[in-house]
């Protein structure tokens, strides 16, 4: 309950916007320019009522046309200064907002790329994208126009109040006495706007996340003819977001109505008292006119602040959501004084009595008391049924997670004592589900080693036997392959992944059965590319198809997170254990299928 109360208090304030101050201070010239021209515009505006008073009291009474002409000329000069100051203020403020939001987006994205995989186990990608786009847009509005309007109206309102006191202390006392009656309800309504704005942003993020997920798997959706179902769910999410936004807008509208009605009602009441003083001769008509204008300025400023408060509350909700991301600490981080791997590391891998359970399934161990080592240049295959812990071994070698007990060592060093980036720089991965980016073939291969020369990229493609299909593409290496490489076949995507790993030229290679979903011809090509890649490297292979690991130096058989058997293919078959049963199932089933197809 205490946590809920603390969170509720947090959501009722504009404190999250403080996180933007360091970004503003990076650009002091723009900030100083914006403040200077803002003050100049406000000061110029506040001179107008004084000019009007002098014109009413002196110009009209004496019927001095030259005096009036001079004052109108002065008003033109004031208007020119006001226009120039307003234009410059707009330029500095808007460019400052654009610059700050660009920095915020960069920092949030950079921070997200540093977060550990465990974070993404529980957070949807669409939610993060929503914060990077919609929320930063809200902040841009706040840092730009909204904050500028808030500061301008604050200065104008305070300046007008000060001039009202100078003009007529008596009437000003009545106005100042009415301010709490207006301001206190505004603060209360502002809290409601703050909560509703946050809810609207969260609901929109949910809709965005769902849309991103469905668009990313559009072929699966269409294959199962689920278009109507998906559209229906998205429509429901959008309608829910609309209802939340409408509630927020209604609260802001009511806030604006209340503020403007109360402020201008108080001005009318004060003017009624002022008109009685004019009739009594206590003040001149020009003085009342001056006070009237200052009252209108003050009322307008307070009324505008009520709208600005709602917008700032909405921006604070966005800043809070971004702050949550920026404050998220990576579960896996480099130690204060990381150890260095040997420059010419052998690439040995060792699991020393390692035990691990995923954070989302803490009561279900993924591996238990895992003990094995892989020598430099050795090829070790890991086999076993689904859920045996094979993929977990790869995740721990890459230090996506840390073991709860025991240790994982690379070149004799506990990976927890290494900088994760330095560790991963020694590892190349060829996954089963290859990630291909919506870029050119050249860029996709170069992802293994950014900055690699064209000659190195093409050499890697030749070694992976990918050059023949790349040369046949319309633009060769510069062909854009579409999102997730949709224009390529499975075998082509796998060969690009192999070329990427070859280009990386790392001493440790992790292969997550790269041929399990390929046809026979593609499998032969990919297998040949893999053999080139494995030469001279320490290799760990997750095998689903046992035919691909017959040449492995050693085979580890896992079940229930433990190694239950190990040896060569031949020795394990003779042992008659789990591996023998898996081998019999696969090879006999395959032979029967082949025989049946032949008949």
Image: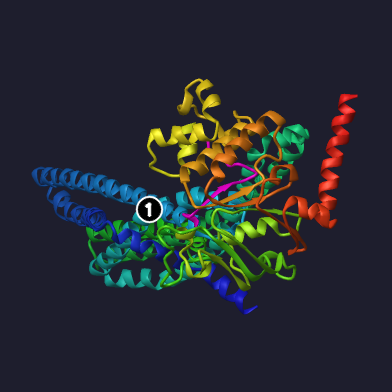
Q: Say whether residue 348 is left or right of residue 92.
A: right
- Please state which of residues 79 and 490 is positioned toward the viewer in this rendering: 490
Magenta: main secondary structure: loop
Residue 427 magenta-drawn? yes
Residue at mark 1: 103
Quadrant where the N terminus is found in the figure: bottom right
* Location of residue 328 in the rendering, given as x and y in whole percent from the top left corner: 52, 65
* Location of residue 82 in the rendering, given as x and y in whole percent from the top left corner: 22, 48
Kindly state the secondary structure of the residue where label 1 is placed: helix
* Location of residue 68 in the rendering, given as x and y in whole percent from the top left corner: 14, 45
> Residue visible at 39% across and 51% down?
101
Quadrant where the C terminus is found in the figure: top right
> Residue visible at 60% across and 76% down?
3
> Residue visible at 33% across and 48% down?
94
Instruction: Judge whether residue 74 can be spotted in this image.
Output: yes
Sort mark 1 into few (<14), some (14-19) or many (20+) by Cα contacts within 10 Å.
Answer: few
Q: Quadrant of residue 116?
A: bottom right
* Location of residue 134 in the rendering, given as x and y in whole percent from the top left corner: 51, 48
Residue 465 magenta-drawn? no
Q: Say whether residue 524 is left or right of residue 107.
A: right
Whether 16 is drawn above or below 379: the answer is: below
**Quick one: which residue is furthest to the bottom in this view?**
2
- Please state which of residues 458 and 328 is positioned toward the viewer in this rendering: 458
Instruction: Judge whether residue 246 can be spotted in this image.
Output: no
| Magenta residues, start to end | 424-439
Q: Say whether residue 78 is left or right of residue 247.
A: left
Q: Say whether residue 23 is left or right of residue 185.
A: left
- Please state which of residues 254 and 587 is positioned toward the viewer in this rendering: 587
Colour scheme of the rendered structure: rainbow
- Please state which of residues 254 and 14 is positioned toward the viewer in this rendering: 14
């Amino acid at each position: 309950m205490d946590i809920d109360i603390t969170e509720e208090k947090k959501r009722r304030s504009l404190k999250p916007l403080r996180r933007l101050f360091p970004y503003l201070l990076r650009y002091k010239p723009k900030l100083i320019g914006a403040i200077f021209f803002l003050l100049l515009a406000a000061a110029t505006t506040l001179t107008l009522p004084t000019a009007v008073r002098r014109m009413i009291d002196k110009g009209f009474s004496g019927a001095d046309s030259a005096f009036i002409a001079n004052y109108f000329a002065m008003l033109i000069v004031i208007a020119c200064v006001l226009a120039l100051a307003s234009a410059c203020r707009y330029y500095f403020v808007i460019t400052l907002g654009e610059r700050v939001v660009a920095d915020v987006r960069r920092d949030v994205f950079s921070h997200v790329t540093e977060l550990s995989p465990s974070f993404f186990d529980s957070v949807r990608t669409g939610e993060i994208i929503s914060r990077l786009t919609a929320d930063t847009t809200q902040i841009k509005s706040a840092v730009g126009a909204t904050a500028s309007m808030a500061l301008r109206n604050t200065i104008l309102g305070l300046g007008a109040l000060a001039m009202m006191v100078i003009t007529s202390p008596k009437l000003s006392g009545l106005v100042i006495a009415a301010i709490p009656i207006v301001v206190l309800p505004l603060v209360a309504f502002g809290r409601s706007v703050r909560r509703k704005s946050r809810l609207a942003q969260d609901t929109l993020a949910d809709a965005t996340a769902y849309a991103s997920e469905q668009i990313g798997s559009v072929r699966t959706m269409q294959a199962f003819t689920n278009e109507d179902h998906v559209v229906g769910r998205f429509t429901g999410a959008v309608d829910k977001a609309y209802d939340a936004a409408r509630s927020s807008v209604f609260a802001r509208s009511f806030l604006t109505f209340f503020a403007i009605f109360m402020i201008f009602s108080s001005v009318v009441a004060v003017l009624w008292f002022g008109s009685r003083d004019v009739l009594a001769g206590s003040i001149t008509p020009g003085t009342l006119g001056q006070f009237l204008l200052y009252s209108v300025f003050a009322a307008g400023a307070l009324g505008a602040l009520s709208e600005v408060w709602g917008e700032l509350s909405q921006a604070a909700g966005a800043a809070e959501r971004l702050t949550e991301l920026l404050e998220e600490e990576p579960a896996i981080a480099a130690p204060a004084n990381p150890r260095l791997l040997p420059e010419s590391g052998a690439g040995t891998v060792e699991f020393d009595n390692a035990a691990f359970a995923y954070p989302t399934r803490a009561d279900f161990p993924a591996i238990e008391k895992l003990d094995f080592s892989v020598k430099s240049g050795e090829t070790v295959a890991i086999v076993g049924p689904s859920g045996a812990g094979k993929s977990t071994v790869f995740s721990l070698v890459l230090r996506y997670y840390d073991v709860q007990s025991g240790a994982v060592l690379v070149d004799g060093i506990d990976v927890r004592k290494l900088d994760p980036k330095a560790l991963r720089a020694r590892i190349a991965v060829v996954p089963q589900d290859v990630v291909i980016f919506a870029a050119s073939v050249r860029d996709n291969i170069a992802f293994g080693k950014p900055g690699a020369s064209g000659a190195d990229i093409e050499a890697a493609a030749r070694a992976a036997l990918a050059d023949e299909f790349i040369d046949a593409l319309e633009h060769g290496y510069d062909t854009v392959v579409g999102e997730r490489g949709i224009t390529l076949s499975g075998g082509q995507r796998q060969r690009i992944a192999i070329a990427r790993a070859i280009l990386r030229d790392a001493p440790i290679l992790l292969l997550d059965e790269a041929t399990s979903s390929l046809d026979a011809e593609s499998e032969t090509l990919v297998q040949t590319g893999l053999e080139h890649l494995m030469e001279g490297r320490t290799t760990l292979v997750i095998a689903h198809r046992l035919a691909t690991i017959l040449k492995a130096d050693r085979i580890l058989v896992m079940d229930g997170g433990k190694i239950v058997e190990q040896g060569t293919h031949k020795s394990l078959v003779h042992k008659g254990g789990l591996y023998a049963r898996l081998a019999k199932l696969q090879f006999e089933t395959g032979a029967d299928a082949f025989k049946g197809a032949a008949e």
